[in-house]
Amino acid sequence: MLTVRHLRRSGLSPVSFDLEDGECLAVQGSSGSGKSLLLRALADLDPHEGEISLDDKSWDSMPATQWRRQVVYLPSEPGWWSDYVVDHFLVWEEAIPWVEALDLPAAIRDRTVERLSTGERQRLALVRALVLNPRVLLLDEPTSGLDNKTTYNVEQILKGRLSRGTSLLWVTHDPAQARRVAQRCLFLENGHVHEEWL
Ligand SMILES: Nc1ncnc2c1ncn2[C@@H]1O[C@H](COP(=O)(O)OP(=O)(O)OP(=O)(O)O)[C@@H](O)[C@H]1O
C-alpha cells in the first residue's frame, strides 16, 4: 500500500491519502492546479517534504533509483533520449506483448521517434512504463491524445494491471473517465486538496 501523509512541495497544498494495492485513485483539477507537481513529488523527481511510504518502507530509506523503479511516473509529454524506438527498451522482447495489446505495429521497433504520431508516442511511453512492472503507476493524462476506441483499450489494459495488484494514480480532465477507472478521486481546487467517492 502507498501511504502519503502531509506531502508538501512548492506550488501544492499539503496532500494525504492511502492507495491500496490494485486500487485506482483519480486526480482531477483545473489546468495549473498542481496535478503534475503532485505526481512528480510522489516519484521523488522534485524536492518535497512529508511522508511517502510503500508497505511501510519510506521513500527516503532507499536510493531514489530504487524508489522510482517501484513508483513510476508517466508524464503527459514523455521524454525521449534516442532517435530510435528500440533504444528506449532494455529488452525489446518484453515490450512485444504490450505493443500488440496497444495496437502498435511490430515494425515500430525500428522506427524513429520523430516519425511517430502523437498517439503512437503516447502509447509507446505507456509500454515503457508497463515493462517496468511497477507497484504504483502515476499516469498524467495517459489518453489525452487518443481516440475513443484506443482510449477504451488503454483503460482495459490498465484495469488488467489493477487486477494484478498494480496501484494507479490517474490524472484526467474527463469526469466520465474518472468514474470508469476509479472509485475515489483527489480534487485539487483553489489551492486545496480534498478526496471524494465517485
Ligand atoms: N517547481 C515548481 N514549483 C512551483 N510551482 C511550479 C513548479 N513547476 C511548475 N509550477 C507551477 O505550478 C502550477 C501547477 O503546474 P502543474 O503542471 O502541476 O499543473 P497541472 O494541474 O498538471 O495542469 P495541466 O492540467 O494544465 O497539465 C503551474 O502554474 C506551474 O507553472
Image (cartoon, rainbow, N blue to C red):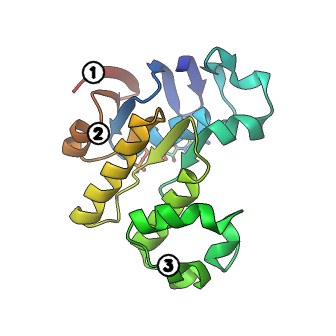
Question: Which residue is located at x 45 percent, y 18 percent?
Answer: 17
Question: Which residue is located at x 19 percent, y 43 percent?
Answer: 176
The span from disc 1 to disc 3 (Cα, nearest Å) is 41 Å
Kindly indicate whether the residue at mark 3 contacts the one at mark 2 (C-beta within 8 angstroms): no
Q: Position of residue 133 (x, y in %)?
A: 58, 45
**Crowding near pointer 1: few (<14 within 10 Å), some, many (20+)?**
few
Q: What mark, if any, has residue 196 been given in the picture?
A: 1
The span from disc 2 to disc 3 (Cα, nearest Å) is 28 Å
* Vertical comparison of 78 with 111: above or below: above
Q: What mark, if any, has residue 12 been given in the picture?
A: none
Kindly indicate whether the residue at mark 1 contacts the one at mark 2 (C-beta within 8 angstroms): no
Q: What mark, if any, has residue 181 been given in the picture?
A: 2
In which image quadrant can residue 78 be found? Answer: bottom right
Q: Secondary structure at mark 2?
A: helix
Question: Which residue is located at x 39 percent, y 23 percent?
Answer: 192
Q: What mark, if any, has residue 106 been given in the picture?
A: 3
Q: Is residue 121 left or right of residue 109?
A: left
The answer as to whether callout 3 falls within 8 Å of ligand 1 is no
Task: Nearest to the eye among marks 2 and 1: give it.
Answer: 2
Amino acid, disc 1: Glu
Q: Is residue 30 left or right of residue 95?
A: left
